[in-house]
Image (cartoon, grey):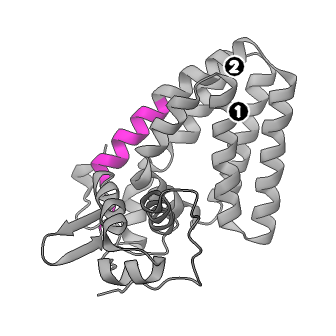
């Protein structure tokens, strides 16, 4: 059984709720694959690490359970769960539905400032690939997409989508480990920005559909290379 192994000290921000900070820390570690499936998240140990009572730890773990990122076993503890494919498929469907409409809207009214900002995130990602910094790459990836939601005045939808995307994000991080995947993401982002700049809604939709659909099409290969994360997946379970 894998145990919770914190990376360095944690400084709790007294101006913010403890449960939310603990949740954000643990969720980030799970999504970034720092905590593998089966990692034991023991409440008392977490409370000692974060310097709080078990109450905010319990609340944070309950929120992670709602997102299907952990399993809570009464009287036995909490463990990081394998990737929930139904959750990932639902998050993919939600994100694809939203972003197809968002890029169509943005391409119908091209904005030079927005395009330059999107291109800036693309250059950031290229630099991340060159230095092998996948954490910074993922942050720039999220910033690219969030900027489109903001431009479309859909910030609330961004927050909704992010709250549902934990398992899909885990799959994407696994996929990023594949040779050439990061480079293809950079190119797809560049293509999305170019389609918006050209004022071509149909092309923008096509590039987003290609960009967001790739990971789920690779589940068989991902399971072979990362069986601990995709226990029980078979060809007949393909979306």
Residue marked by disc 2 = 106
Residue 206, percent from left and from top: 59, 27
Local secondary structure at mark 1: helix
Q: Residue at x 43, y 45 (%)?
A: 163
Range drawn in magenta: 81-96
Mark 1 surroundings: few (<14), some (14-19) or many (≥20) residues within 10 A: many
Q: Give the answer, above or below, for where 30 lies relative to 217.
A: below
Q: Give the answer, above or below, for where 96 lies relative to 83.
A: above
Mark 2 surroundings: few (<14), some (14-19) or many (≥20) residues within 10 A: many
Q: Give the answer, above or below, for where 234 lies relative to 12.
A: above
- Label count reads 2
Where, by quadrant of the figure, is residue 74 drawn?
bottom left
Q: Is residue 86 magenta?
A: yes
Magenta-colored segment: predominant secondary structure: helix
Q: Residue at x 12, y 76 (%)?
A: 75
User: Which image quadrant: the C terminus?
Assistant: top left
Nearer-the-camera pick, 199 or 42: 42
Residue marked by disc 1 = 192
Residue 50, percent from left and from top: 47, 76
- Asked if one can make out residue 42 in the rendered structure from this viewpoint, the answer is no
83 vs 236, left or right, is right
Which is nearer the N-term, disc 2 or disc 1? Answer: 2
Residue 162, percent from left and from top: 49, 44
Q: Residue at x 75, y 63 (%)?
A: 129
User: Which image quadrant: the N terminus?
Assistant: bottom left
Q: Is residue 85 magenta?
A: yes
Local secondary structure at mark 2: helix
Residue 224 tag number: none
19 vs 239, left or right, is right
Residue 203, percent from left and from top: 66, 22
């Amino acid at each position: 059984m894998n145990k919770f192994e914190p990376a360095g000290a944690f400084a709790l921000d007294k101006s913010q709720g403890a449960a939310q900070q603990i949740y954000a820390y643990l969720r980030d570690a799970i999504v970034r694959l720092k905590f593998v499936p089966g990692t034991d998240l023991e409440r008392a140990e977490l409370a000692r690490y974060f310097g709080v009572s078990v109450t905010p730890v319990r609340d944070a773990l309950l929120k992670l359970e709602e997102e299907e990122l952990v399993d809570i076993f009464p009287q036995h503890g909490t463990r990081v769960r394998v990737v929930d494919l139904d959750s990932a498929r639902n998050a993919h469907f939600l994100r694809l539905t939203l972003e197809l409409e968002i890029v169509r809207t943005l391409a119908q009214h091209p904005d030079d400032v927005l395009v330059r900002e999107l291109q800036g995130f693309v250059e950031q990602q290229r630099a991340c690939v060159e230095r092998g910094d996948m954490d910074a790459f993922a942050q720039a990836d999220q910033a690219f997409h969030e900027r489109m939601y903001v431009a479309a005045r859909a910030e609330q939808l961004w927050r909704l989508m992010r709250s549902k995307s934990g398992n899909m994000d885990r799959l994407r991080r696994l996929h990023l480990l594949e040779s050439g995947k990061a480079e293809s993401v950079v190119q797809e982002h560049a293509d999305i920005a170019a389609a918006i700049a050209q004022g071509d809604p149909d092309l923008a939709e096509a590039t987003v559909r290609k960009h967001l659909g790739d990971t789920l099409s690779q589940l068989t290969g991902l399971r072979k290379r990362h069986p601990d994360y995709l226990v029980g997946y078979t060809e007949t379970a393909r979306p």
